[in-house]
Image (cartoon, helix red, strand yellow):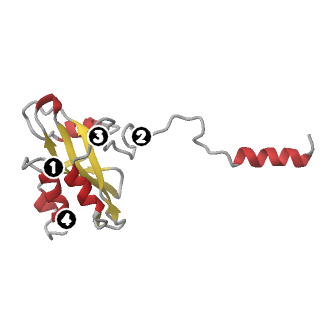
Amino acid sequence: MSSDQDYAAFLEKANEDPSQGAAQSSSATSNKPGQFRTTQQGVTVPAPILEALDKGDAFYISDADEPFDPVALQWDEAGEGLPDEEEFANLIQHWDPKNAEVQILDPYDWDSHGKYGGVIEAVREAGQGNDVRVYRVVRDGTRVEYFVVTTEGKGKGAKLVGVKALAVES
C-alpha cells in the first residue's frame, strides 16, 4: 500500500461516525452521570404539556436559558401521590439515588415572579388538578435540573408527567 492509500484509509477511519455500531442511547434509558431519564418508551406525554412546549417560549431563564423538555415516566404511586426525594432520584435513574441532592419545592415559590405560569398550568391540567411539585436535582457544581411534575392516573397505571429544564446557576 502506498503512503497515499495509507493516508486515505486513515482519513476514512477518522471521519467514521463514532456511534456507528454502538447501541443508541437516549434520555429514556440513559443512566450516565449528568444525565437523567425523562421519558420511557410506551409512556405518552399528555397533550396540554406538548401544547405548552410547542408555543416556542417555554424556556427556563438562567445562565443557560434552556428549553423545557417533556417528562413522562411510569409511576406506581400506590395511593401516595408524588414521590419523595429518594423515590424521585430512582425514577429519573440518578446514578446515586441515596445520596442525590434532591429538593422539593412548591411551584409558586419556585416561580415567585410568575414567569412560568403557563408551564405550571399545563402540568396541572395534564394531572387533572392533582398536586404539582418542583424537584430540584443537582447535576454538578453549577448545573441543576428542575422537574415540574404531577401524577396522571392512580395506582400501578399512574404516570409522572410534566416538564424539566436545565439551569446553570453560577
* Residue tagged 4: 116
Instruction: Give the quadrant of residue 86.
Output: top left
Question: Is residue 46 something that shows in the picture?
Answer: yes
Q: Is residue 154 left or right of residue 140?
A: left
Instruction: Give the residue at x 15% y 40%.
Output: 84
Instruction: Give the residue at x 25% y 52%.
Output: 163
Where does residue 24 sit, x and y in percent of width and height?
49, 38
Q: Residues within 10 Å of mark 3 (few under 14, many from 20)?
A: many
Q: Are marks 2 and 1 in contact (CB under 8 Å)?
A: no
N-term mark: 4 or 2: 2
In three-dimensional space, the C-alpha distance between marks 4 and 2, rounded to whole angstroms, equals 29 Å
In three-dimensional space, the C-alpha distance between marks 4 and 3, rounded to whole angstroms, equals 22 Å
Instruction: Give the residue at x 15% y 64%.
Output: 117
Q: Residues within 10 Å of mark 1 (few under 14, many from 20)?
A: many
Q: Secondary structure at mark 2?
A: loop
In three-dimensional space, the C-alpha distance between marks 1 and 4, rounded to whole angstroms, equals 16 Å
Question: Who is closer to the viewer here, 64 or 19?
Answer: 19
In three-dimensional space, the C-alpha distance between marks 2 and 1, rounded to whole angstroms, equals 29 Å
* Residue tagged 1: 126
Circle on res. 135:
none
* Residue tagged 2: 32
Where does residue 42 sit, x and y in percent of width and height?
30, 35
Question: How many marks are shown on the rendered structure?
Answer: 4
N-term mark: 2 or 3: 2
Looking at the image, is 150 positioned above or below residue 118?
Answer: above
In three-dimensional space, the C-alpha distance between marks 2 and 3, rounded to whole angstroms, equals 11 Å
Type of amino acid at the residue the image marks with label 2: Lys
Question: Who is closer to the viewer here, 88 or 125?
Answer: 125
N-term mark: 2 or 1: 2
* Residue tagged 3: 92
